[in-house]
């Protein structure tokens, strides 16, 4: 897919981190970008920077997502590109014993469901609604109507202690990539997923320097944290390369996560 003809894109979780880098990269190619996020101040500032549009969207809500797509399409037209970066995580053992008093507890189900609703169901909600819109588009020269890129995590394959919900949600994103690509293959819509490793994003911003150094040292090569711009470059490759379809690709410097 060529990105120099003023086509439209939606980036969820686009106000910061991986999503922000992708929004900037798309805009630099001439794409009209709508940012879906709950971080209004950051989202509006980035939209102003790249000449895009910010839509305050909660991916767990049908009404909110519908309103976001309506606003984006009114401003830019039907999107041909969707990049799903909205996500969250937590760390709770499935069952554990308190070191203080021996109290036994299990992973609160509402906390488990919260992660799954955002990372997995929220991703699928945006895919389904965006793809339905893409079906109404005329195909491009190569028969293509759209391209979708999702964000999973290396935790989908080697989750750590306490990551049952996070790993399940990201594993679900990986697991649904090929079936969705097959669902949409007859309509010229491609679907791929990136599994990032340890990236230098706002989630790590509050970590002490020694923690960041230890994380960087755990990467086989290069021994550093991933850069959001590197994620964005892979996302654009998946969008621009018309033969890239139904794939799940790790972007992690060769890391395989230890139990903790």
Image (cartoon, rainbow, N blue to C red):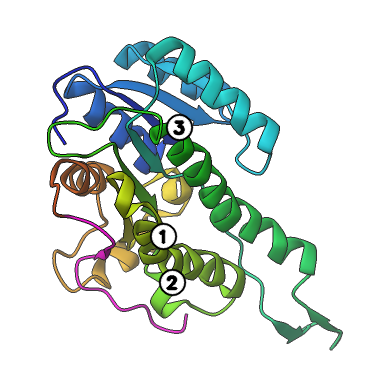
246 to the left or right of 259 = left
Instruction: Check if mark 2's residue and mark 1's residue have beta carbons within 8 Å.
Output: yes
* Residue pictured at 46% horizontal, 37% vertical: 130
* Residue at position x 33%, y 57% in the image: 193
Q: Which residue is mark 1?
A: 152
Judge whether residue 69 can be spotted in this image: yes
Answer whether labels 3 and 1 touch (C-beta < 8 Å). no
Q: Residue at x 58, y 48 (%)?
A: 122
Q: Mark 2 highlights which residue?
A: 156
Q: Which residue is mark 3?
A: 133
Going from N to C along the chain, the mark reached first, 2 or 3, is 3
Q: How many marks?
A: 3
How far across and how far down the image is residue 167, in percent? Answer: 51, 71
Report the magenta residues as a range.
244-260
Q: Earlier in the sequence, mark 3 or mark 1?
A: 3
Whole-percent x, y for residue 37 in the image: 53, 31
Quote the CA–CA distance across marks 2 and 1. Answer: 7 Å
Would residue 209 appear left or right of 112 to someone viewing this image? left
Q: Magenta span has 246?
A: yes
Magenta run includes residue 45: no
Q: Does residue 177 sit above or below 44 in this rendering?
A: below
- Of the residues tagged 3 and 1, which is closer to the observer? 3
Q: Position of residue 206 (x, y in %)?
A: 48, 47
């Amino acid at each position: 897919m060529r990105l120099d003809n003023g086509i439209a894109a939606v980036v969820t979780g686009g106000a910061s981190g991986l999503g922000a880098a992708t929004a900037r990269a798309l805009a630099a190619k001439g794409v009209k970008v709508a940012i879906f996020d709950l971080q209004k101040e950051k989202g509006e500032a980035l939209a102003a920077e790249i000449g895009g549009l910010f839509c305050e969207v909660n991916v767990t809500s049908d009404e909110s997502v519908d309103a976001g797509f309506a606003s984006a399409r009114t401003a830019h037209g039907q999107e041909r590109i969707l990049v799903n970066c909205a996500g969250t995580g937590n760390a709770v053992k499935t069952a554990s014993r308190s070191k203080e008093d021996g109290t036994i507890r299990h992973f609160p189900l509402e906390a488990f469901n919260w992660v799954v609703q955002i990372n997995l169901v929220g991703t699928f909600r945006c895919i389904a609604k965006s793809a339905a819109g893409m079906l109404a588009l005329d195909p491009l020269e190569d028969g293509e109507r759209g391209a979708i890129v999702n964000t999973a995590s290396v935790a989908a394959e080697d989750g750590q202690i306490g990551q049952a919900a996070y790993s399940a949600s990201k594993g679900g994103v990986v697991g649904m990539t090929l079936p969705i690509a097959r669902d949409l293959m007859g309509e010229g819509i491609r679907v791929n997923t990136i599994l990032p490793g340890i990236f230098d994003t706002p989630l790590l911003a509050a970590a002490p320097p020694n923690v960041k150094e230890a994380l960087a040292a755990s990467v086989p090569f290069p021994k550093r944290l991933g850069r959001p711009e590197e994620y964005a470059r892979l996302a654009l490759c998946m969008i621009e390369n018309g033969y890239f379809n139904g794939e799940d690709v790790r972007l992690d410097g060769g890391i395989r996560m230890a139990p903790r």
